[in-house]
Image (cartoon, coloured by chain):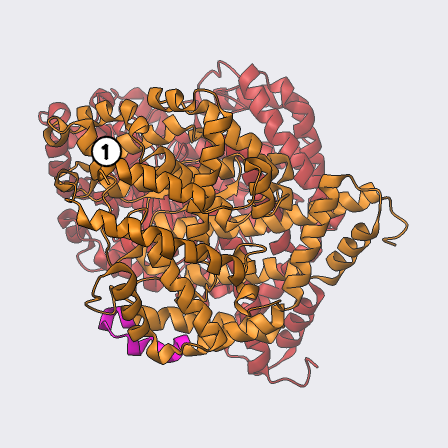
Chain colours: A red, B orange
Amino acid sequence: MVLAQSTAELYDQYKAKMQQIADVRNAIAVLGWDQETYLPEKSANFRGQQITTLSSIAHEMFTEEPLGHLLQELHSRGDLDPVSAKNISLSLEDYEKNKKYPASFVAEMSQTTNECYHAWIKARKSGTYADFEPVLAKMVALKRQETALLGFEGHCYNALLNEYEKGATTTMLDAVFTDVKTALTPLLRQIEQKPQVNKDFLHLHYDRDRQWEFGINLLKAMGYDMKAGRQDISEHPFTTSFNPQDVRVTTRIDENDFGNMTWSCIHEGGHALYEQGLDISAYGLPAGEAASLGIHESQSRLWENNVGRSLSFWESHYVPLQQAFPENLQSVPLQDFYKAINQVRPSLIRTEADELTYHFHVMIRYEIEKGLLDGTYSTKDLKEIWNRYYNEYLHVTVPNDVEGVLQDIHWSHGSFGYFPTYSLGSFYAAQFFAAAEQQIPGLETDIIKGSYTNLLTWLREKIHHFGRFYTSNELCEKVTGKPLDFKYFLDYSTKKYGNIYTL
Amino acid sequence: MVLAQSTAELYDQYKAKMQQIADVRNAIAVLGWDQETYLPEKSANFRGQQITTLSSIAHEMFTEEPLGHLLQELHSRGDLDPVSAKNISLSLEDYEKNKKYPASFVAEMSQTTNECYHAWIKARKSGTYADFEPVLAKMVALKRQETALLGFEGHCYNALLNEYEKGATTTMLDAVFTDVKTALTPLLRQIEQKPQVNKDFLHLHYDRDRQWEFGINLLKAMGYDMKAGRQDISEHPFTTSFNPQDVRVTTRIDENDFGNMTWSCIHEGGHALYEQGLDISAYGLPAGEAASLGIHESQSRLWENNVGRSLSFWESHYVPLQQAFPENLQSVPLQDFYKAINQVRPSLIRTEADELTYHFHVMIRYEIEKGLLDGTYSTKDLKEIWNRYYNEYLHVTVPNDVEGVLQDIHWSHGSFGYFPTYSLGSFYAAQFFAAAEQQIPGLETDIIKGSYTNLLTWLREKIHHFGRFYTSNELCEKVTGKPLDFKYFLDYSTKKYGNIYTL
């Protein structure tokens, strides 16, 4: 029956099915958003169950045999236009990957993830890594099984890296993190020799409502479309999208830490601009999806760091900020503010790290994950390994497990291979921004004036618009003329901190 | 295979399936809640599509053959306990009803509903019923087809009435509305002869935030569990439930009409207390669902009118209200406030009507629906019929279609048979409340003191707890000792308005 139909008819069937699957997945995202923002306290269990049910439905819809036949048939036809052909080949790839998981494995993973998350919560309460270790060991064993199911070339970790960043390998990441170690370590040591900048005034009392308003204005200034999104409060800031015309961000407000809200707004705003910029006519199709986690992170980091932590950015935003909080900032010159928001200081917690030491946190996790998967490391020794790495790379002593090996939620969720995308995001961001500086005449003047239209248009045309059409590295070459090169991040950092710390 | 399994095993399968279906339906409810409260402006179309997809999935899940076999098998087994047996027989009834709709009919209805809704919106903009009429005629024709599909005894309208209020018939409703006409008309005429009470002070400026806080306090006082629900703002107030531990209400605030927020809070609060009182262990099963729309409305009306518009209620709430709005109410005595909130005055708009004239609005719609379905009336004449009825029963002249025949959304949604449940709700409420007054010692004193625990406990035990186990009338007999009797509403009204208007 399939064979008798025209390619156009079959492609329409494919589109309709993918859009239905997207509807279910986006409904799950709405339930998730509500869970983090407005869910009544007592409803957590039922919500968990509702999400599980919809997730099974989405999974079933995307693993049904007729969809597989349809994809294979379309894949074999020669008369698809390039974008449609790419959609089909990516969907087929996703489909075949999903089919690699036997139902028994999916059930065991779901069960273990649940156990592991609760063990992590418990361990954080007791402050004891030992409470987490046995279940984490089970999780690691399952993740190893997963690498075998998925298949890989080279290191088994590649199978998992590929889940978050298609094409990423240990070979590539070893090189990147060697650069981090060899190039950023001396820079960090240099900074440590210099007098530290003052940021005490960022920890005075900043009124909640005025912070909220300032954050909303930042989002609007960036070009975030408030008619196609909204901001709410949640414990951990995040971005979620239900379609390009409903992309929501959240923030948190700490009245004693102005940075918390500000960087979350700009960071999540960067993610959201990407999602709002995806092709709405490709809803549910690969062409309407983000390229990868690394590219997603490049968008948030570009706005947060390359734009948002630049002196140019604050040329236009600092006066409104002073007006909003005259009691704290009236007597603080712009230069001092700029230095304060760029303070570099090795610390314990990844999510609170500055943009330089951040990558040491990521590197440590990368090394640990790689070692756990290939058997070099055992979960039994993880606390010691963790503490040793922090001492070695960041010169900090880990005082307890909660601020150490238990700090991230990722492993308890079974997310191995995710961390590296954070660093890749920053490095792509630096390279993209360097290209933007070359390609957009007057970009710095724009930024000084608080006008980001040209930058956003450029990002939309060069990056957002393509969805998943290109892999991260293909996209990077297309935008910047070469594959990912750490040099851009190094140049950016050397120049920026050289100036701030008079190195 | 089914036959070889034990009844307990089969019943567990049934429960699991029903809970999954409930998860999908509740996810739809979350999407609907979000649509009315927080949806970004541009996202309406995508949200509509997402809801449609999930609705089809829920429909498919509930019409699958294996579920039918399972229900039939369980229905034939003799070893179920009474509650389980009732769940099965109700689910089987629902299942068989759903199976009566051919896919082509469902598709045509969905299509026509969409058209009809947009025609209604358009007609309200142009102010012309004629813009709505052709599509409404199509809808009426479809609803007639639906009565044939569903089957009925007596009047064809019974098939539709049964959808909202199992067991309701035109015979029963003709009798009820005859009572309305014969008994309430003279009461209304008597009131019209008397000097009107003053309610101008309810239309002074009432600050939004103080109204919000007062409303939240009312909800809490009623016993609404804020940890198992929340209140938000929407254009039209509503209650929605995703499970008994997540029952949400919305309200609207008009700064120039204090009543708007107050009555919506108490009314929706009444609906919400019912939902929060349903048996959580019967999630997804008939035993965990509300009895009917009429019984649901009885709960909102009981709180709104029998409790919330009583003098006793305001004995405890009026002082806090005066303290919240001293500028408007300091010099208004409680008696005057009580009269103002109970003003009776025939008017054009159902949703703004007082609790006496309200039933004439409903009766008009009932007569029209009955006539449209049996062919006595044609949509072509509907405007004239509407205006004539309003003139006859309410002595008001309809100035335009928007405030006349176009005022309700129901017909555009294909909801024929829904309106009567509004009146039934009030009449059940009066009868239930009379029983509560008899059965709960010191109820009036409780209410004067602002304590509703005994009342809520009584409602939970006598009504909420039973879910759909009894039909409305069975429940009414169980709670009050007799079937629905209009006399209770008449007694209540005669006493109340006799006092207010010194009749």
- Residue B322 horizontal side relative to residue A407, left or right: left
Residue situated in front as seen by the camera: B438 or B183: B183
Q: Quadrant of residue B314?
A: top left
Is residue A303 rendered magenta in the image?
Answer: no
- Residue A306 horizontal side relative to residue A111, left or right: left
Can residue B460 be seen here? The reply is yes
> The numbered mark 1 sits on a residue in which chain?
B
Q: Position of residue B255 (x, y in %)?
A: 18, 42
Residue situated in front as seen by the camera: A169 or B315: B315
> Circle 1 is placed at which residue position?
B338
- Residue B188 horizontal side relative to residue A115, left or right: left
- Residue B289 horizontal side relative to residue B433, left or right: right
Q: Is residue A132 above or below residue A363?
A: above
Q: Quadrant of residue B419?
A: bottom left
Q: Residue furthest right?
A: B4
Determine crowd level at label 1: few under 14, some 14-19, many 20+ residues with C-alpha closer than 10 A. Answer: many
Q: Position of residue A252 (x, y in %)?
A: 34, 33
Can residue A21 be seen here? The reply is no
The residue at 52%/46% (across/down) is B484
Q: Quadrant of residue A313?
A: top left
> Element under label 1?
helix
Residue situated in front as seen by the camera: A302 or B415: B415
Q: Position of residue B453 (x, y in %)?
A: 45, 23
Kind of residue sitting beneath label 1: Tyr
Start-end of magenta stretch: B123-136
